[in-house]
Image (cartoon, rainbow, N blue to C red):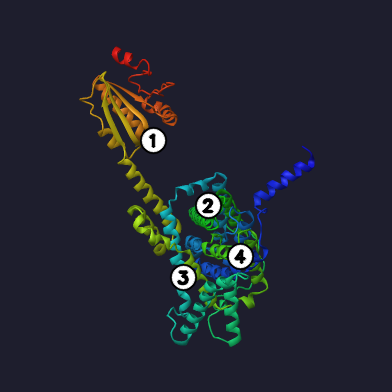
Amino acid sequence: MNKSTWRNISMEKYLNFFDFKQKVDYKTEVLSGLTVALALVPEAIAFALIAGLSPLTGLYAAFVMGLVTSILGGRPGMISGATGAVAVVIVSLAISHGPEYVFATVVLAGILQILAGVFRLGKLMRLVPHPVIFGFVNGLAIIIFMSQLDQFKDPSGNWLTGQSLYILLGLVLLTMLIIWGLPKITKIIPASLAAILTIFGLVVAFGIDTKTVGDIASIKGGFPPFHIPNVPLTLETLTLIFPFAAIMAGVGLIESLLTLNIIDEITETRGRGNKEAVAQGVANILSGVFSGMGGCAMIGQSLINTSNGARARLSGIVAAVALLMFIMFGSGLIQQLPMAALTGLMIMVAIGTFEWASFSTINRMPKSDIFVMVVVTLVTVFLHNLALAVIIGVVIAALVFAWDNATRIRARKSIDKEGVKHYEIYGPLFFGSVSVFNDKFDVVYDPKVVVINFKESRVVDMSAIEALNKITERYSKLGKKVHLRHLSKDCQKLLKNADAIIEVNVLEDPNYKLVVDKLEVETIETVEAKKVVKDL
């Protein structure tokens, strides 16, 4: 292979790794990135305040997270930044020990996320059933909507009334109308960006007195300052921050990988979960050393981006760089943006996020799936803990699945003309079905020779192995012999691995893959089966 060919192959791998070969609509990507940057400002500020940190801490996190994950992430078009889920995790640490310990926690969380990606734990998302995703998405949509209601309150926390309320409500509705109606007319410019610019123009032109971004907090700052978290490098510090880092890493990965799956469905493409986990980890490490609060994928901003037609990495890079430009040079202008425009935008995101199809499928879904979906939604809404909601949903779904399979094990019984009784087992044999399995056998009244056929069954776990051992012992005590037949190769391997514990011996037969327990080691072949039984 010559140098030119090797160079071309290396470049091909490089382009494939970063997904740079895909076709890019530069205008759409840039305009969508600017829209996302505008929507990131109030979100990042709000989440930083929730975490008990300065607004710039959230803005710096949004810049670093957005830039790094856009370049290295496993899902082009997905947006990351400071999030409420992370803010809730670190708020108590920020209040008790200050921002330096938060930065150290973010770095440690990033390391844990990289390890999760390296060990390919992203595949665990396969265990998240669809009702859990429905509940997660619906709960998140409700949270996004409810969080916008704060804009209809004054600084004292009281609801707006009179002219202030009517102006804000009118501007919000106009924003929503533009976002809904403009795509039906033209798609030259993203509807969300057009709505923001229109409302901004109306407020400035007519001097309308309404709440702006500057009324929340100042966003003026410089380039994120680099510094190593100023915390003692001791075991005590590690003991303090590790629980927060572990929870933050888990929450961030769950929210990021679920967002990745949702964007996959929307774009009908497939992202790479493990690559995204590594990118999230690198982004959090850099966020921690560049004065950021850390974060993860943001479903709201990701949906804004994809709804604008962005599909490549460029939109996320533009959003991150534009956000930094706002902080360093455009804070005065951005602080004049009406919150009504951003509120209307996020309400439309909430409407688009909600899985309305879940209502139409309720009558066709199993009751257990409906229950899981409702529980996940309620936990997400009332506890604001997305990771806990997903874990609870997965646990409930797993228990329902185990219960259903535990009751499905069957045994077809027959006695051949040689007097041998056959049990043909149907369904998986595992911890949940062991009790039902044991009840299928009439040990006392069965003949001297019993064959248990697992052709339509599988031995799944240690509880199943122990059940096999006990059933052979029960027959042995009465002087009867048991043959286990047609176990699959993985079942045989499981039995062999357990040999030291329950002393099960495995003999393979080329026709039957027959297995018998330690009390009677014997191979019954097709041709000699009757002869062996007679000899017995």
CA neighbours of label 2 inside 10 A, class few (<14), some (14 to 19), many (20+):
some
Asked if the residue under mark 4 is in contact with the one under mark 2, i.e. CB atoms within 8 Å, the reply is: no
Instruction: For the N terminus, give its image quadrant.
Output: top right
**What amino acid type should be assigned to the residue bearing mark 2?**
Leu
Q: Which mark is residue 60?
A: 4
| Percent of width and height locating residue 503 | 37, 24
Q: Which mark is residue 147?
A: 3
| Percent of width and height locating residue 435 | 28, 37
| Percent of width and height locating residue 99 | 55, 63
Alpha carbons under labels 4 and 3: distance apart: 22 Å
SS at circle 3? helix
Alpha carbons under labels 2 and 1: distance apart: 37 Å
Pointer 1 residue? 461
First of labels 2, 4 by sequence position = 4
Seen from the viewer's position, the closer of residues 183 and 428 is 183
Seen from the viewer's position, the closer of residues 169 and 57 is 169
CA neighbours of label 4 inside 10 A, class few (<14), some (14 to 19), many (20+):
many
SS at circle 1? loop
- Can residue 136 be spotted in the picture? yes
- Can residue 233 be spotted in the picture? no
**What amino acid type should be assigned to the residue bearing mark 1?**
Asp
